[in-house]
Image (cartoon, rainbow, N blue to C red):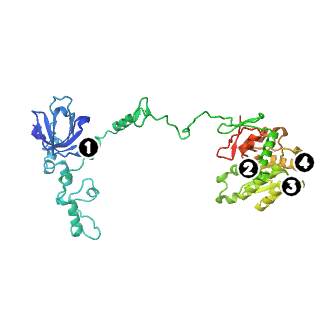
Amino acid sequence: MAADWLGSLVSINCGPTLGVYQGEVSSVDQTSQTISLRQPFHNGVKCSVPEVTFSAMDIKELKILDISNGCAVNSASVSSKTSSAPVAVPKADPRAQGRLNSPQHCSKSYGERHLDVPGQPKAFRRRHNSWSSSSRGANQPTPKKNGVKNGGGPMKQRDDECFGDAIDDGLDTDFDFEGNLALFDKAAVFSEIEGSDRRGNGTRSRGTPQEQTPTRYRHDENILENKPVVYRQIKVPQAGAKEYCTDSGLVVPSVSYELHKRLVAAAERHGLSLERRLEMTGVCASQMALTLLGGPNRLTPKNVHQRPTVALLCGPHVQGAQGISCGRHLANHEVEVILFLPNFVKMLDPVTTELAIYSRTGGKQVSSIKDLPDSPVDLIINCLDCHENTFLMDQPWYRAAADWANQNRAPVLSIDPPVSGQGLAVEAKWSLSLCLPLALAEGAGRVYLCDIGVPCHVFQEVGIKYHSPFGCKFVIPLHSA
């Protein structure tokens, strides 16, 4: 009975320690309960020894991959749970007798049946998994290559050298990819890797279990904090009427207009002249205005037919000069600027200087409210108000300009508006304060803060403990604390 299984291909699982062996049965000894395999494979790799013998006590599972001598083709498995159990082999299936008794299946091994092709010499054996075996017939000639026909010339000599009889006999058997892949337990391998990377209560570790890494942080949380964060980094001699805070939580107190004047005077003594402050204010205000106009979504070379229009309302004072500086930068960025400035009042020297530079940009200037557009513009920049001269609000030109701004449906940006006690004739949507904010009225809208470049030591000179809240920006939004 044991001789009936000689020549069959089997797979023997000897557990996780010894592994899985595959090969052709060479002998079965029922007395000593052993089985021998010829040309064995261990875990998918061909063994260096020609034959391996197994005892029944080492066999955990036995699978029959291919049976010769008229036995069943279907794979069967026999488990050996105890060491004293004999090696059991299933009986033959009579339905497969006719098909397996043919010369091709009973006289050749598993690999030889796939490598040999009838009518073709052994030197030209086709590989079972190659493209040629599935796309061409057995006797179909190989297509021409480099003008030399198959079967003669140097091309045939090269094929004989590569695929001739001198090749190792071990390559005649196809590698069992499916059987070898079945031996790999992916879930168990990954479970082992995760288990080796985890120590203690689940904290991931590298190296020994004692070398545990700290808690992992997200990209916005990976910040080392040596000491608690101080959010009140700016302190003024006298608490203002309002307090603001930045997006990061820093507290920015408001200052009185008297303290603001002392700060500006100290900065001018240290070289921060009015011209420097006007230029910084104009650049920061124009950057904010460009963002409000749409930024890169609006100001592109493909959108030259829809250039934004800005109406700039200025008075004959320093705040008006700041607005003219902003209009000059906007005009340089292809924004259509319409500047309103009355010409029947006395102008200060900074206003005259800024107006002369603005006239070189090609921007439009009007002195009458009638010359302003009737249709809504994209943005109105209000620089009519002055901190010191409150009598301008009673002037007819001021009233006319304020009425036009309130009736126009465009949003309003106020630059350096006065404190809340003076009132605002034009209701704004945004207000831009300089250096430190004043206590603005409710009609000032959302407050933004502009950095005009005052050094920290200048703040200390007027009694202000100052730490810059701007970070990487020159214009930041403020929120009511």
> Within the image, what quadrant is residue 481 found in?
top right
Q: Are marks 1 and 4 in contact (CB under 8 Å)?
A: no
Residue beneath disc 2:
285
What residue would you read off at disc 3? 368
x then y, percent, for residue 24 = 16, 44
CB within 8 Å, label 1 to label 3: no
Q: Tell me the quarter of the picture where residue 423 sits.
A: top right
Q: Is residue 197 visible?
A: yes
Kind of residue sitting beneath label 4? Gln
**Between discs 1 and 3, the one toward the N terminus:** 1
Type of the residue with mark 3: Ser
Residue 409: percent from the left, percent from the top? 77, 47
Q: Find out whether the residues at labels 1 and 2 contact each other: C-beta distance under 8 Å.
A: no
Q: CA distance from mark 4 to mark 3?
A: 14 Å
Residue pictured at 24% horizontal, 67% vertical:
155
Q: Position of residue 339 (x, y in %)?
A: 80, 55
Q: Earlier in the sequence, mark 4 or mark 2?
A: 2
Name the residue at 29% across, 57% down.
131
The residue where tag 1 is placed is: 179
Amino acid type at image mark 1: Gly
